[in-house]
Amino acid sequence: MEFIRSNLLRDHTAATEVKKIDLPVNPISHLIISLDMYNATDEATLAEVLAFINTIQVTHNGRAILSMQSEDLYGLNSYLYGNRPVLVGKLATDNLLRCLSLVVPFGRRIFDPDECFPGTRKGELTLSLDYTAPATSADNGTLNIEAVELPEATPQRFLKSIMNTVSAPGATGDNDYELPIGNPIVAAMIRCTTWPAASSHAFGVDMAKVLVDNKEFGYASARAQCMTGDLIHRYDTQHGAIAAQGLITPDSVFFVDFDPAKDGNFLLETAGKSSVKLRMEMGVDEATYVSTMELVDV
């Protein structure tokens, strides 16, 4: 089967702007977004590099197919591909090139002709990238964007990935978030604001459960600590054995996973349901970020 990999934006000087690009018309497996820059005196950390990319959004005729902050897309990449995204230049050397690449996925696997975004007409499918020019921890940023098309594909479905900010509920305890209804849900990614530090057991979200039509489904009561442990099934979770080698990255994310065996047998079916809720027991009264990944039939 043929594929086409093409550069859509080459060495674009990074500015503080919203960059919009019309995407190719053939079925698309995924996009690759790379932001490179020079260290400013010391090594720019992953968190600092991610902060330069604010939001990534792909829309089809104005409707969001993917909408995420960079931290959540990083987490989604780790979940789907079993590895953390590549960040080069891991030395504290002034002006050393630092480059982070993120994949914008339209299927759970890349190069899958059955699960990718279908063909469109020119101007219907658009990438919008909101980013900030590297200027403090790093500088001299440039942006590259590429697409992988599958011109012979006849997809049956595509992956829709949407992040929402859940406002602080006003107190600790249960905080219900309405999950989307209509499509099978692959997973919900929870990114906490608070993560345990010294002498603390406090997670922003202590426990999660799922309610379908007000009945517990799948996740009856899952603790943050144990769901963090579930990351072993998804990607390399250890940088090394000493503190200087870093924490799990991202270190504030866990998944309410309905595709644990990666075979589609446990997807959360929502069609015809009246209510599908993610109930988060808040350990801290604060905002939380929830991203849902759905499979949408073509």
Image (cartoon, rainbow, N blue to C red):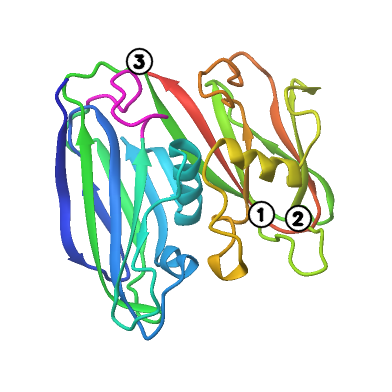
Q: Is residue 111 magenta?
A: yes
Q: Secondary structure at mark 3?
A: loop
**Residue 286 part of the magenta-drawn span:** no
**Disc 2 marks which amino acid?**
Phe
Residue, disc 2 = 203
Frontmost of labels 2 and 3 is 2
Residue at x 62%, y 13% (from the top left corner): 272
The stretch in magenta equals 106-119
Q: Are marks 1 and 2 in contact (CB under 8 Å)?
A: yes
Percent across and percent down for residue 111 are 28, 28
Residue 192 badge? 1
Position in image of residue 154 (x %, y %): 25, 16
Q: Is residue 66 above or below residue 109?
A: below
Q: Is residue 141 left or right of residue 232?
A: left
Q: Residue at x 84, y 55 (%)?
A: 171
Query: In the rendered picture of this protein, how many numbered marks are placed on residues?
Result: 3
Extreme residue toward the bottom, this view: 41
**Disc nearer the start of the sequence (3/1):** 3
State the separation of the CA atoms marked 3 and 1: 34 Å
On the picture, is 295 further left or further right than 250?
left
Is 204 in front, or is 215?
A: 204
Pick the quarter of the image with the C terminus: top left
- Residue bearing the label numbered 3: 156
Rendered residue at 56%/15% (across/down):
265
Q: Is residue 62 visible?
A: no
In three-dimensional space, the C-alpha distance between marks 2 and 3, rounded to whole angstroms, equals: 39 Å
* Residue 66 position by quadrant: top left
Residue beneath the point at 68% across and 53% down: 167
* Disc 1 from disc 2: Cα separation: 7 Å
Q: Residue furthest front?
A: 241
